[in-house]
Amino acid sequence: MSEIRDINFWQSGAMKIQWVKNNMSLLRSIEEEFLRDKPFAGLKVALSVHLEAKTAYLCKVLAAGGAKMYVTGSNPLSTQDDVAAALVHDGLEVYAWYNATDEEYHRHISRVIEAGPNIIIDDGGDLVNLIHSEYPELIPNVIGGCEETTTGILRLIAMNKQGSLKFPMVLVNDAKCKHFFDNRYGTGQSVWDGINRTTNLIVAGKNVVVAGYGWCGKGVAMRAKGLGASVIITEIDPVKALEAVMDGFKVMKMEEAAKLGDFFVTVTGCKDAITENSFMNMKDGAILCNAGHFDCEVDVAGLKKIATDTKKARNNIDGYKLSNGNWVYVLGEGRLVNLACGDGHPAEIMDMSFAIQALSAAYLVKNKGKLQDMIINVPDEVDREVAERKLKFWELEIDKLTDEQEKYLNSWQID
Ligand SMILES: NC(=O)c1ccc[n+]([C@@H]2O[C@H](COP(=O)([O-])OP(=O)(O)OC[C@H]3O[C@@H](n4cnc5c(N)ncnc54)[C@H](O)[C@@H]3O)[C@@H](O)[C@H]2O)c1
């Protein structure tokens, strides 16, 4: 039995899913193949990914492949109730609603694990963590799983080092066709979409501080520059910091950047990127948000403790007054701003990420029992196939090596 807010919302959800489907050509082609080949016939798939329209379409594609789907969201503020309703209307089991409490969120992710899945599609590691810690008796059913994001992969690597990971997991995030595009261009565009539609303020001429110059941070900084902001990067890695300098950005410590920023975006995957010392140095009206997976990057709990007053300033904007009289504003409670305050990445981007998810899940089934390692990289052929299909759908052609060129590239002697 599904647990969603209201099935009557389904028509609006169905419309959103149809819209993204129209723009997800790779997944459409995979859906046709899955309908024909039924790679997941008789298998249960548990999925925990931000539950909005693109994810819903991935669920439908896996269901078309014969999977019995058990779906939940990977963040309480990114679930869209109408989308959840549309999936239930289509016969999938869904356990999620917008703004779930911690207890409800835990119950929802528990339900999909209690179904006894054979494949796990995870985003941030919550399902894998839960089955290992609370439902170890269900582990033997699991053929393997796929992990969507950087933070989830860090957790998997830590588990594997300890020898605690008990089934193979494909590192979807590490595929080129995932993080080159999703983390950089997807996060870059959708973070500013979320900030702009929530604040309705100008970015041009302002100082934007981006904490973390990894794949996501590069995208967020690049698009901030495009919107006319002066961009400041904070980092802990000297190589990334140098890269930011040569990309034309200012680099400094957060305690210095705190004094200058009008907008702050954290994308570190680390806790406490912005804490109390920085809040106290910020300008009146500074806007803070996070795009990293967990809501521990901006220390909102610490901010609540030191605030002398609070207010709801606008939908998805909470104001906190500090003892120096300044107000600072947090978007989407410090959860991923592009999903809590927006619709997430563009459909054409998630088309690639989810094509890799779908093909990786099929790869796990095809290689059931044969995979020796617990940590599996997406095979190069999958990356190549996704890129080739995407170019084809966009009607773009590239050159092919001639035999002569191929020979030249593979030899060390020059004739
Ligand atoms: N919002 C989204 O839609 C979305 C999409 C993809 C990934 N993510 C999440 O975003 C986060 C970053 O992902 P990524 O792929 O860019 O990772 P990454 O590893 O490529 O980059 C993270 C960067 O942050 C830096 N860093 C770490 N701690 C720091 C600190 N305390 N202060 C300043 N810099 C620090 C690291 O040196 C690194 O350069 C992860 O949590 C990931 O799961 C979010």
Image: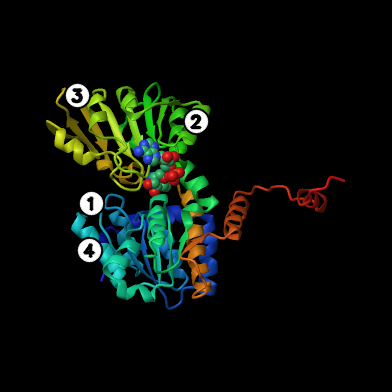
The quarter in which the N terminus is drawn is: bottom left
Residue positioned 50% across, 26% down in the render? 248
Q: Earlier in the sequence, mark 4 or mark 2?
A: 4
Give the number of the disc on residue 99: 1
Picture layout, residue 283 above or below residue 142: above
Between marks 1 and 2, how big is the CA–CA gap? 40 Å
Residue positioned 69% across, 47% down in the render? 398
Secondary structure of the residue carrying numbered label 1: loop
Q: Determine contact: label 4, label 1, CB under 8 Å.
A: no
Secondary structure of the residue carrying numbered label 4: helix
Mark nearest the camera among 4 and 1 is 4
Between marks 4 and 2, how big is the CA–CA gap? 44 Å
Label 1 crowding class (10 Å Cα cut-off): few <14, some 14-19, many 20+? some
Q: Which residue is mark 2?
A: 242
- How is this picture coloured? rainbow
Q: Which residue is mark 3?
A: 326
Mark nearest the camera among 1 and 3 is 3
Picture layout, residue 65 above or below residue 178: below
Q: Which residue is mark 4?
A: 107
